[in-house]
Amino acid sequence: MTVTKTLEEKVLNVKVEGRLDTATAPALEEELAEVMDEAEELVFDLEGLEYMSSAGLRILLATQKKMAQKGGMKVVNVNDVIKEIFDITGFSDILTIE
Amino acid sequence: MPKKTIKEMSELERRRHSLEAKTFHAVLMGSLILGVMSLILGLGLYVYSLGNQYINEAFELTKNAEGVIENVGDVRDICNETLDIYHSLSDEERAVQDDEYFARFDTVTKSEVYPRVIDFLLEYYASSDVNDIFIAMYDEETQALVYVADPDDKRPLRTGAWEAETAKEISQFLNSDGSTEIYNISYTDKYGWLCTTGVPIMNDDGSIASFILADVSLEELLHGMQSFTILYTIATVLTVLLLGFLLSRHIRKNMVEPINMIAEAAEAYVKDKKDGGTLSENHFKGLGIDTGDEIENLYFTLSDMEKDLNAYEEDLTKAIQEQQRIGTELDLAKRIQEDMLPTIFPPFPERKDFDVYASMIPAKEVGGDFYDYFLIDDDHLCIIMADVSGKGIPAALFMMASKILLKTTAMAIPEPGKILARVNNQICNNNSLEMFVTAWLGILELSTGKLTAANAGHEYPIIRQHGGRYELYRDRHGFVMGGMEGMEYKEYEVLLKPGSEVFLYTDGVTEAANEKNEQFGTKRLLESLNSGLAPELKGVLERVNDAVDVFVGDAPQFDDITMLCLYYAGADATDSSEEQREGRYMKEMTLEATVGNIPIVTDFINTELEALECPMKAQMQIDIAVDELFGNIAQYAYDPLTGPATVRVEVDDDPMAVIITFIDHGKPYDPLAGKEPDITLNAEDREVGGLGVFLVKKTMDEITYEYKNGQNILKIRKNMQEG
């Protein structure tokens, strides 16, 4: 998994590629923790994400809760595999997916 | 129409074409030509000699008459007078020869000499064979023959009578001086063929006064020729027929019949040979041909040939019978040898702790590969894989001896090293042909999984420890058995975990060559073994076999391909080994359950899934499930410590599905018992836990949990087919 972050005018863009699973989730959590405070808005770009297990879902949920207090969060470039996972788990209703 | 051969001809046709008939025809034709030619020659000679004789005779008669007539009187006077009167007449007076005309010659006929001449001629005519004798003169002026005296009774002509005559016919007479024979042959309607000879009667001044002419009939001569020809022809035909008959009879007796006899004998000979007649019968010998020529020579040659052929055939028959006998015995030997190898699987159906499967694909010729497995006692299973040098009956016999020696020795002393040493000595003692055998022998202690083995120059065994991959076990090789007496064989031990396999083989597998003469080799063997999950033990061998087949292609198989696979389920074998016998086969790995080890498990599972050509989406979902479930064990089962977990992959083929089992012996925990997360809640109210198992439940086709023997056993099933 690789994570690429860009912060522009308080909008944090996080690009996640590869596999987001139990083993890699903690790394993403750390990356986010470093910049979360500075960000007003957050955009997850999941274009290069192969799959995501519940560990990833947990991060998305936790981040969603935090960002809800600020400028909000949205998820973009969701592929079919990930979309299906979102659908199965009801995340499609919680997240702002564009 | 194409020419018929003698074999296609009917009896009649054959007779017509036989040498006999040909001889007869030849004689006939030859004689005919000869006959005609000699007939012509004979006739010529006949005519020449007889004709001459006739002419001569007539001439002599005429000449004689001329001589004698001088005595009668002066013939010349009446001749000259007749012609004078003739000349004195005009053409008109001469034209009609009537009484008036003839009356003009009265001076001649009334002369004194004339009656005497007539009498003379008549007398002469009566006393000789002449047809006619007369005196006449040719008148050149009127080109006519003027008769002076012609008194013969057949056609008497009066004096002065004339006949037109060309100068050409008469010229030779006119030029004659009476010394040479003069004759003319002519055909007359009245008398047929006549020969006229003439002698001149000379005047004193040397001119010709007249001719005395005589006609001789040639009819007799012609009759003679006719009868000669008839007689000659009859004689010739009779001679030819007789000659032809005799010759063809000779040919028949001395050629046709002997040749036919030989031909019939040859036919009978061939027929007897086809019908498998007795060899002692002599077809040619009994013919007794003694023609004393080439045919007799042929007869002797054929008699000798028959004798030689009979002797040869007898030898050949014996040789073929011997060969058939050997062939049959070879087949039997091959059967006996193959029967020596146990082929009933599973061999120990009541045993749940192990299973064995073996196979041998024999090459065309009897080979020397063999395997064996037998229980020394309840707790010790002996496994042997061996290969005798060479091929054919010697290898088969050597193999039998080796197999029996190994088994009896193993039953007596269950120590692999000592078994090989002792058998080696026994083989060496009686091994004049210096054959040898390579063997791997192992004894597995079933209660502990301890495998004790020794290797006498045989291929390395391949061992797959529980949860691992098939790997070459490079054991220490001893010398081949039968090579040298007093060899020692080092024993070694391998501890087999429950669920492990030992794969044994002969060089027929690794040295199987393709058309480019490349060998299959150990590397390809390992690759084929590790290439996927076999649904059962038999499948492991089949997988290798298939790989060898694909590799070898159309190249012929030179060596036996022999393999054996031992599966050790463990002393207290569980259901899994039963499942395996029912047809499922599994792969599993046991490792420390940590989050860091998740990729290892994922890789392990993915390797097997790729071998099964699992659809991408299903593989992704399985990967997520592995991540969730193994991750749970890593994080919670042994919390706060970590412990081992086993991941097992099984393949079910009806319907095609992958079954993955996660086993740990951590805290009893049923992930299915938990409350399902409420996915309808909004983000604020959603809880973070329980999502993983929920996701697995949703994407897998089946998920079961049980706690048994202190183990958490979680099993998921994913069908390979979509939908």
Image (cartoon, rainbow, N blue to C red):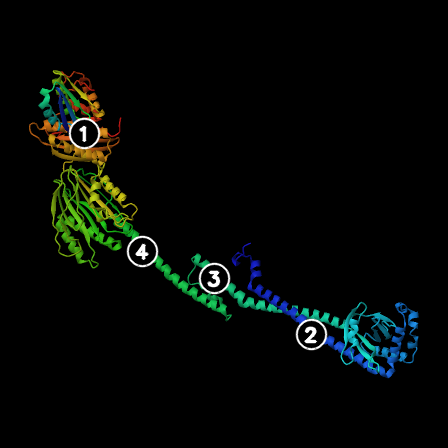
Q: Amino acid at mark 3?
A: Ala
> Marks 2 and 3, Cα distance to the nearest angstrom?
56 Å
Q: Secondary structure at mark 3?
A: helix
> Could you tell me if the residues under marks 2 and 3 are in contact, i.e. CB atoms within 8 Å?
no
Q: Which residue is mark 2?
A: B45
Q: Between residues B536 and B120, which one lies in front from this camera angle?
A: B120
Residue occupied by mark 3: B266
Number of residues whose C-alpha sits closer than 10 Å to that of mark 1, classed few (under 14), some (14–19) or many (20 or more)? many
> Does residue B363 appear to the left or right of B69 in the view shown?
left
Mark 4 or mark 3, which has the lower sequence index? 3
Tell me, yes or no, whether dots 4 and 3 are on the same chain: yes
Residue type, numbered disc 1: Asp
* Up-down relation of residue B545 to residue B34 (above or below): above
Could you tell whether B388 is left or right of B124 in the image?
A: left
Residue B461 locus on image (x, y percent): 17, 45
Q: Secondary structure at mark 2?
A: helix
The type of residue carrying mark 4 is Ile
Q: Earlier in the sequence, mark 4 or mark 2?
A: 2
Which numbered tag is attached to residue B623? Answer: 1
Q: Are marks 4 and 2 on the same chain?
A: yes
**Residue at which label 4 appears:** B326
Find numbered disc 4 in the image and state the secondary structure of the residue it sits on. Answer: helix
| Image point (51%, 66%), residue name | B258
Q: Amino acid at mark 2?
A: Leu
Q: Are marks 2 and 1 in contact (CB under 8 Å)?
A: no
Is residue B679 toward the left or the right of residue B322 in the image? left
Which mark is in front, 4 or 2? 2
Query: What is the CA distance from the residue labelled 4 to the residue labelled 2?
Result: 89 Å
Image quadrant of residue B22? Answer: bottom right
Please tell me which of labels 4 and 1 falls first in the chain.
Answer: 4
